Structure formats: structure tokens, C-alpha cells
Image (cartoon, rainbow, N blue to C red):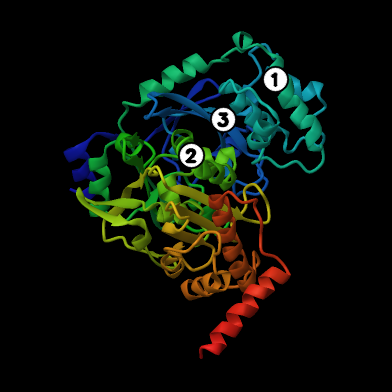
């Protein structure tokens, strides 16, 4: 008896057919290659070519469609716009998928969202239009009242090269004129019924032989089954796919075994108590942003710029931490906040500070068979202020050149009594600025010795120069972000060091360094 057969008999019945609803019709799909993207399946197998491939990395939004998925936290179905170019088809098991071809009624009458685009002349070549339409339809599903800022957020993950954004935004404004009571659900009642019924289905486990490779995809529903699979196999853990999806579409990597966490109820929980928040491994950035944003305003803004609505709806908080990227935005923020990780190895729990999880580039503190089960973020105390700032070439959807996170508090005399600082983009890993944090303790926020602060930053980090920023720029910006955080704390107008001011700090630091040998 094989290990897999023994596992199936011992723990739970499994199935090999993917079951989803596509534009209101149930689809039963026999085993496929686990890295087949949803977009390619729609275009090549279902001939639904309204979904376009532009960048194949979740950036341009041409592949946007809307999925309905069960939300374990709210115990209801949530409707989200997603990038189908980097989602693998088996991840959609038990979900409802709605493409641009599925918006019109059975009689051919256009959906009001489509009508708004037509009446406002919001399409030219038409390549990007289906993606824009589906992003607006996702907003429609949420009954969102769209002001100018909300429209910018809604379309941040969609690019148009020829129509121009004015008529597109006008189309979005147009949908506000339709009363909520007149907004039809367009099969959504049937879709939600299908999704809820499928929550209790057997685990999905696909095995396909491709050339000389055996390809496998496991999507368990119980935490115990995750632990057992990791005990007997070494799969690649998959949550949102916003990073791993690019390994397939851009690097053309051949991945043999996925363990998908998105269907595990225990990992789809975001719990809050008086002390803090526990974010399960399958909680998306959007889910965390909605629940935690009111307590951490700076995190709310960071999440808003972290990625588009499509990326936030798929990518997970723990996944962003677990991949250990040096330019990850969430990790430095959580390091400054004093977060900790719960690691699970077949039920054996280990809790570590998040800062110690990152060892070196591409290396994390994970033992054999262990995975990140959750991250804990303590709430702010009454006298604490948290700030985070992202510096990138684009405002939306761009990789950080430098990201700074600051947890600060002052005593009654205006002296720093707490300074927990971390940066992204300054080292091969997200990293605490331990020398800087130690130096700042007890410093007067009205008279910060900037030359010494810069020396402390230089002691903590040795950044590289790359296409996003030079080494010196990163040093300058790290100091600037500290100045901004301190000025905010002191209630001063926001100001930055630039030109002569930066040179003065560098010169002062240089003279002091050589004066004292």
C-alpha cells in the first residue's frame, strides 16, 4: 500500500475532480496539471477569450475576473476581483467564477456596469476593457458608493494605454446613480448556495503524470491533514499564489507538488482580543486590512499601497512573511510592532519573534516539516504611536526602494522612551534597526542628533545599489523617514532633509568620525 493510499484511508476521503461554478453553470473538471492557470483554462479550454493576458504577473489587470469564495471569518460568501493569470485552477475548487462573458442577462441585455462603459465611451482598443469592467463589477457586488478616491483604489490594478482614464472613471461614477434596491444579483443567489454547499466537500487531491514527472496538488480542509502531508512529503506551500504564480509564468519553473492552505478553516481565522490580533496563514491582505485598519491607521495606508485590490484579495499576510523577501512591506512593520510567529511541525508548536525568522537571503528559521501557522501582532498601548512609510517610484503597486516602520513613544519631557524601528529594502532580509533604536532611547525629539542617527543607520545596514535606488539614496531616505516619523511625533510640519541639509549631515558625520579616529 502506498503512503498516499494509506493516508487517504486513515484520515479522510479525497476526490480528484475540481468542482466550480463558471458563469452560473457547474463545471466538473478531471485532474489537470496543478500549475495550469485559471486564465489559460478559460481561454484555451472554455474559449472565453474576453479574459486577456497582458503582463502575466498580476500587474496590468487585463485578466481580471470576479470570484465568489466562502469567507470563514464572516461565515458568508465574499466577492472579489482577482488576477486570473497567476491563480492556479485547482485553487478555485468550490468557488464561483464570473467572467466578462457572464455579465449580460440570458436575453443578451448588458449588465449596468457594461452599459456604463458604453454610454461613457470608456473603451477604445478594448484590450483592457474587460478587466476594468470586472473590477467595477466587483465594486458593484460590494454595493460600494464610489467617490474619486475609491475609484482610484478600485482601478489601481488596471492599466489602460489608449482610452484615457477620465471616461473610465466617469463610467464608475455613473453606477452610483443606480439605486441599491434596483441592483440585481444576477445568479448570485444560486452561486452562493453552490459555494456554501461545497464547503463540506471532501478534500481535493490531484495527481497527474506529465512526461516523466508526477505532479500533485493537495487542498485539505483540516489542519491535521496539513500536518500529516508535511510529515510525509516536502510540498511547496501555496496560499494566495501572488508570488509563486510568477515562478510559473515568468521563471517557467516546473513545480511537482503544491500544498494549498486556502481551504483550511483553522487557518482562515483572524482573531482579536484585548491584547492583539492573530492572523491565520490563509488570511488575505484585504481581510486583515478590513479588520485591523481601524486600530493601525499607518498599516491601513501601507496595505492600500501594498498592491491592487486584485492582489490584496488573493495574497496572504503570512505568505508575504514566509517568502522572506527583502523588499516585503509587511514584515518590517510587524518587526517594529513586536510581532511573533507560530510555527507548526506536526502539531508541535514553536513561537518565535518575527525578527529572528529571517536568517539570510532566501533562508528562514523553518525546521523540517514546519510551516508558519499564524502571526500575532500586539495592539498599541495608550502612549505608543506607530508609523510606516513606503518609498517607491510609483504610488500604487510598486516594489519599495525603502520601507520604514517606527513604533515610538515619549515621556512627559519629550524624550524617547520607546523606539522600535525596522526597514525593508536596506538589507538582504527585512531587518530591525537595532543600533539606531538603542541610540534613540532617551533622546530629545526636539533636538535629534542627525549625524549620529545616520552613523547608527550605517552600522545597521549595508544596502546595495540596484535599479530601484542607489546605496546612498537608501541611506538618505532611511534618515529622511526617521526625521518624518519624529516630526510627526513632535507635532511639527512634515519636512525632509534634502540637498545641502543631507550634505551637512554627511559632512558632520564624516568629520566626527575622523576627529575621533
Q: Secondary structure at mark 1?
A: helix
> Does any portion of residue 345 appear in the rendered image?
yes
Name the image quarter holding residue 233: bottom left
The one of 158 and 67 positioned closer to us in this rendering? 158
Q: Quadrant of residue 369?
A: bottom left
The reply to whether residue 245 is visible in this rendering is no
Q: Is residue 290 left or right of residue 502?
A: left
- Distance, label 2 to label 1, CA atoms, is 31 Å
Residue contact at pointers 2 and 1, CB within 8 angstroms: no
Q: Position of residue 430 (x, y in %)?
A: 46, 62
Say whether disc 2 or disc 1 marks the residue closer to the N-terminus.
2
Say which residue label 1 marks.
Answer: 175
User: Between residues 60 and 506, which one lies in front from this camera angle?
Assistant: 506
Residue 324, compared with residue 240, is above or below; it is below
> Residue 131 versus residue 310: which sits nearer the camera?
310
Residue that extends furthest to the top in the rendered view of this protein: 181
Q: Which residue is mark 3?
A: 66
Disc 2 packing (10 Å; few <14; some 14–19; many ≥20): many
Instruction: Give coordinates of residue 434: x percent, y percent.
Output: 41, 67
Residue ID at (58%, 38%): 309
Residue 128, quarter of picture: top right
**Residue 170 drawn above or below residue 409:** above
Mark 1 closeness class: few <14, some 14–19, many ≥20 residues within 10 Å:
many
Residue at left 46%, top 56%? 332
Q: Is residue 5 above or below residue 201?
A: below
Q: Nearer the viewer, residue 371 or 468?
A: 468
Residue at the extreme front: 413
Q: Are marks 2 and 3 in contact (CB under 8 Å)?
A: no
Residue 359, above or below 352: below
Residue 438 in the image: state x and y as whole percent.
Answer: 41, 67
Judge left or right: residue 185 versus residue 231.
Answer: right
Amino acid at each position: 500500500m502506498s503512503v498516499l493510499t494509506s493516508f487517504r484511508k486513515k484520515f479522510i476521503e479525497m476526490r480528484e475532480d475540481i468542482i466550480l461554478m463558471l458563469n452560473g453553470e457547474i463545471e466538473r473538471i478531471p485532474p489537470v496539471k496543478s500549475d495550469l492557470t485559471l486564465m489559460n483554462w478559460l481561454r484555451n479550454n472554455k474559449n472565453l477569450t474576453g479574459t486577456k493576458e497582458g503582463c502575466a504577473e498580476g500587474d496590468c489587470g487585463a485578466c481580471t475576473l470576479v470570484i465568489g469564495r466562502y469567507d470563514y471569518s464572516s461565515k458568508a460568501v465574499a466577492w472579489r476581483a482577482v488576477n486570473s493569470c497567476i491563480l492556479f485552477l485547482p485553487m478555485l475548487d468550490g468557488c464561483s467564477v464570473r467572467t466578462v462573458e457572464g455579465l449580460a442577462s440570458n436575453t443578451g441585455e448588458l449588465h449596468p456596469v457594461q452599459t456604463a462603459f458604453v454610454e461613457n465611451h470608456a473603451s477604445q482598443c478594448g484590450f483592457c476593457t474587460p478587466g476594468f469592467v470586472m473590477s467595477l463589477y466587483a465594486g458593484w457586488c460590494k454595493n460600494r458608493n464610489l467617490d474619486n478616491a475609491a475609484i482610484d483604489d478600485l482601478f489601481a490594478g488596471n492599466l489602460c494605454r489608449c482610452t484615457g482614464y477620465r471616461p473610465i472613471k466617469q463610467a464608475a461614477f455613473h453606477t452610483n446613480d443606480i439605486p441599491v434596491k434596483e441592483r440585481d444579483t444576477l445568479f448570485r443567489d444560486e452561486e452562493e448556495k453552490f459555494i456554501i454547499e461545497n464547503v463540506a466537500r471532501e478534500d481535493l487531491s490531484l495527481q497527474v503524470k506529465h512526461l516523466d514527472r508526477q505532479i500533485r496538488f493537495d487542498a485539505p480542509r483540516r489542519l491535521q491533514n496539513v500536518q500529516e502531508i508535511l510529515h510525509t512529503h516536502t510540498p511547496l506551500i501555496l496560499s494566495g499564489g501572488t508570488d509563486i504564480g510568477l515562478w510559473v509564468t515568468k521563471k517557467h519553473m516546473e513545480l511537482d507538488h503544491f500544498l494549498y492552505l486556502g481551504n483550511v478553516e483553522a487557518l482562515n481565522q483572524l482573531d482579536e482580543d484585548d491584547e492583539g490580533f492573530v492572523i491565520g496563514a490563509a488570511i488575505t491582505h484585504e481581510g486583515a486590512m478590513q479588520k485591523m485598519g481601524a486600530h493601525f491607521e499607518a498599516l491601513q495606508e501601507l496595505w492600500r499601497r501594498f498592491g491592487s485590490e486584485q492582489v490584496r484579495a488573493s495574497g496572504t499576510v503570512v505568505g508575504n512573511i514566509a517568502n522572506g523577501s527583502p523588499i516585503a512591506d509587511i514584515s518590517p512593520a510587524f518587526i517594529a510592532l513586536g510581532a511573533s510567529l507560530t510555527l507548526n511541525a506536526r502539531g508541535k508548536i514553536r513561537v518565535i519573534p518575527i525578527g529572528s525568522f529571517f536568517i539570510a537571503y532566501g533562508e528562514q528559521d523553518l525546521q523540517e516539516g514546519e510551516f508558519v501557522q499564524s502571526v500575532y501582532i500586539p495592539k498599541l498601548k495608550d502612549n505608543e504611536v506607530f508609523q510606516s512609510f513606503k518609498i517607491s517610484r510609483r504610488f500604487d503597486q510598486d516594489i519599495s526602494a525603502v520601507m520604514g516602520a517606527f513604533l515610538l513613544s515619549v515621556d512627559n519631557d519629550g524624550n524617547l522612551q520607546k523606539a522600535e524601528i525596522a526597514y525593508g529594502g536596506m538589507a538582504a532580509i527585512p531587518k530591525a534597526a537595532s543600533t539606531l533604536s538603542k541610540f534613540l532611547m532617551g533622546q530629545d525629539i526636539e533636538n535629534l542628533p542627525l549625524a549620529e542617527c545616520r552613523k547608527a543607520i550605517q552600522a545597521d545596514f549595508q544596502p546595495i545599489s540596484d535599479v530601484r535606488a542607489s546605496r546612498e539614496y537608501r541611506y538618505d531616505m532611511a534618515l529622511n523617514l526617521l526625521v518624518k516619523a519624529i516630526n510627526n511625533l513632535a507635532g511639527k510640519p512634515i519636512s525632509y532633509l534634502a540637498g545641502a541639509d543631507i550634505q551637512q549631515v554627511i559632512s558632520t558625520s564624516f568629520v566626527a568620525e575622523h576627529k575621533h579616529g
